[in-house]
Image (tube, rainbow, N blue to C red):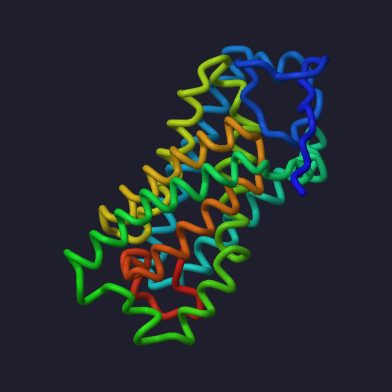
Amino acid sequence: MPVNIAIPSPLGGEGQGEGALRAAGTLPRATEIENPSTSRRVRLVVEIVVLFVCAPLLMMYAVHGCRVPVWAALFPVLVGLNAYLLWDKAFSLKREVSLGVTRDTLLSILVVLLVAGGMVTAYVAQEMPDKFLSLPRERPGVWRKVLTNYPFLSVLVQEFVYRTLFFHRYGPLFGRWRLGLVLVSGLLFGFGHIIFQNWVAVAATTIGGIFLSWRYAETRSFWAVWIEHTLWGWLIFTVGLGGFFFTGIATGWRFSL
């Protein structure tokens, strides 16, 4: 059963309105945080550049230049960012995960997957017949492990970082500019996938990241974006596009989407 709750405004009162760009788990905060000064804005922008631009570049160098397994370069960073989020006293994990998925949202997720996912599936079957269903056909054991582990080892931490953490900490930078927050969050999500060194991975996750950020902005439901991200990942790895999310570096965990 979905849990429908009103999300209190951090500045008091019920309902956030169109200008409330923050995570569902955000608790009341000081005015100087919700309405940052110029100096704080500069610090937050620098922080974004360091964490979401410089860090992926360093991880790419570590993986491809130093042959570090992708999980050793990526997973600790994502876990560290989530630990930072949970350490923030102005954030409530319980509130964040208490907001469920309404029937309308779930229907929207499934319709989008059916239409857009069907187009992706048809394209791969037509244009990349050698790749189509290659993983379940040739390596069914690996395919089953991906479907089992992917929602928890990959999607869970990524959604907390690129949706929950980003909206919670950097939402005040955008004021009432909802589209700006959605675009920046999505673009940075796509940029984070440069570790795979191919334009398909970056382009696909940029589009997907923007849509997931829009979904989170509309619903404030972590579980909505978790479900949608998981379903798309399962589709990508099933139809034969998983190779674009593979670094080629020997490791026990080779996927991230």
Q: Position of residue 174 (x, y in %)?
A: 54, 20
- Side of 184 where 47 appears, left or right: right
- Residue 254 vertical placement versus 20 (above, below): below
* Number of marks in the rendered image: 0
Q: Position of residue 253 (x, y in %)?
A: 50, 75
Which residue shows up at 77% across the image and 36% down it? 4
68 or 86, nearer to the observer: 86
Which residue shows up at 75% across the image and 19% down it? 15
173 or 62, nearer to the observer: 173
Quarter location, residue 221: top right
Q: Position of residue 111 (x, y in %)?
A: 46, 47
Q: Position of residue 108 (x, y in %)?
A: 52, 42
Quarter location, residue 135: bottom left
- Residue 240 vertical placement versus 37 (above, below): below
Which residue shows up at 75% across the image and 36% down it? 25
225 or 63, nearer to the observer: 225
The quadrant in which the C terminus is found is: bottom left
Which residue shows up at 36% across the image and 84% down it? 137
- Side of 100 where 109 appears, left or right: left
- Residue 108 vertical placement versus 156 (above, below): above
- Side of 198 where 171 appears, left or right: right
